[in-house]
Each structure stands twice: as structure tokens, then as C-alpha cells.
Image (spheres, grey):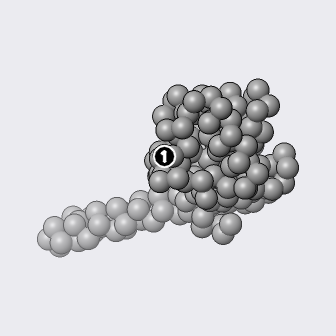
């Protein structure tokens, strides 16, 4: 992650100027943003879902197990729809995937559900890795310095503009305008 990418994401945090690096890190990692993938999923897409517990993809074995369970539960429609592509964001489908995983019938099915619908962090939304506290501290210092510089520059321009107006209005009598 570049410093500019970190600055951009920090700027999205309300009142970032008043937060400590630790608070910023917590807010960057907080999973508060709703993520929904409305695409139509197929068996090949399911096979690509990574299952951290096994360190592998859901794969052919996971698909075969899911297909067998769905067929045994009378859910042929879902099996055929997955061949053509179906959105998996429906709450009933999500609940089924979580239930199949938690019951042990289809281990890893919860990761399919999470690939489709979950809360994500600002970092995940922006495809950024977790920064160190030092990176955040350094970036915050630079950002606050930039804000201060801009404010000082604007004040100087305001004084210069006021001086220019006073110069143009000066008729040669009385005190001369000062910058």
C-alpha cells in the first residue's frame, strides 16, 4: 500500500484529524460496510472459493458434496440453477449455506455465503493490507501538516487580497496600506 492510498482511505473517516493512530487502525479494520455480490454464481465459481480451514479451494469435492446434499433434500432446482448461474444473495439461500456448514454436512459452505454477502472493512473495500501503527502515525502527521499548510497559505492569500484591494483604493492621502 502506498502512502497516498492510506491517505485517501483515512480521509474517508469522519473527524480523522481528531483520532489517534490506534483509533484510525480500529476504524480501518472495523467490518461495518455491507458487501453484496449480486453476480450469478455457477458450480465453477463455487469451486474457486477459498476455505481457510483447509487451506484449499472449495473445489470439486466441495461441489460434489453440496450437490449430493441438495439433491437429497429435494433441492433439485438449486442444483440445476447453479449449472446456469444464480444469485446467492437471497436470505434463504444464505441461511441454507450457513446451516449446511454448521451442521457439518458441507464443511466450507459458510465461505460461499460470505463470498457473496458479508460486512467488510475500509481496508478490504479498498483492497489494502493492514498498515502498521507507525505507518498510520507517519501518515496522520503528514496529513495534519498538509491541512495546516493549506490553512496558512489561504490566510496569506486572504491578507494579500485585502492588501491589493487597499492598494487599489488608496488615493495617496492618509496612512499607506500595509501587508
Question: In which quadrant of the rendered image does the N terminus lie?
Answer: bottom right
x then y, percent, for residue 150:
48, 62
Relative depth, front residue between 155 and 147: 147
Mark 1 closeness class: few <14, some 14–19, many ≥20 residues within 10 Å: some
Relative depth, front residue between 117 and 105: 105
Residue at 84% from the left image edge and 54% from the top image edge: 55
The reply to whether residue 150 is visible in this rendering is yes
- Tell whether 154 sits left or right of 66: left
The reply to whether residue 33 is visible in this rendering is no
The relative height of residue 94 versus residue 177 in the rendered view (above or below) is above
x then y, percent, for residue 76:
54, 38
- Tell whether 92 sits left or right of 6: left
Q: Residue 102 appears in which quarter of the rendering?
A: top right
The relative height of residue 140 versus residue 115 in the rendered view (above or below) is below
Q: Residue 141 appears in which quarter of the rendering?
A: bottom right
Residue at 60% from the left image edge and 64% from the top image edge: 5
In the current view of this chain or complex, which residue is farthest to the right? 54
Residue at 47% from the left image edge and 54% from the top image edge: 84
Quick one: SS at disc 1? helix
Residue hosting label 1: 81
x then y, percent, for residue 4:
60, 67
Amino acid at each position: 500500500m502506498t502512502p497516498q492510498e492510506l491517505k485517501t482511505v483515512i480521509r474517508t473517516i469522519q473527524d480523522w484529524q481528531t483520532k489517534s493512530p490506534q483509533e484510525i487502525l480500529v476504524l480501518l479494520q472495523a467490518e461495518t460496510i455491507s458487501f453484496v455480490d449480486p453476480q450469478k454464481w455457477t458450480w465453477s465459481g463455487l469451486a474457486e472459493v477459498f476455505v481457510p480451514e483447509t487451506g484449499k479451494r472449495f473445489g470439486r469435492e466441495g461441489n460434489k458434496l453440496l450437490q449430493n446434499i441438495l439433491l437429497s433434500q429435494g433441492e433439485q432446482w438449486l442444483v440445476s440453477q447453479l449449472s446456469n448461474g444464480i444469485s446467492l444473495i437471497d436470505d434463504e439461500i444464505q441461511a441454507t449455506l450457513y446451516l449446511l456448514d454448521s451442521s457439518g454436512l458441507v464443511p466450507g459452505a459458510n465461505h460461499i455465503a460470505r463470498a457473496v454477502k458479508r460486512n467488510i472493512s475500509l481496508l478490504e473495500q479498498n483492497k489494502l493490507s493492514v498498515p502498521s501503527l507507525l505507518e498510520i502515525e507517519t501518515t496522520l502527521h503528514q496529513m495534519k501538516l498538509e491541512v495546516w499548510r493549506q490553512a496558512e497559505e489561504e490566510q496569506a492569500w486572504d491578507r494579500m487580497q485585502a492588501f491589493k484591494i487597499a492598494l487599489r483604493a488608496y488615493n495617496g492621502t492618509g496612512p499607506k496600506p500595509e501587508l
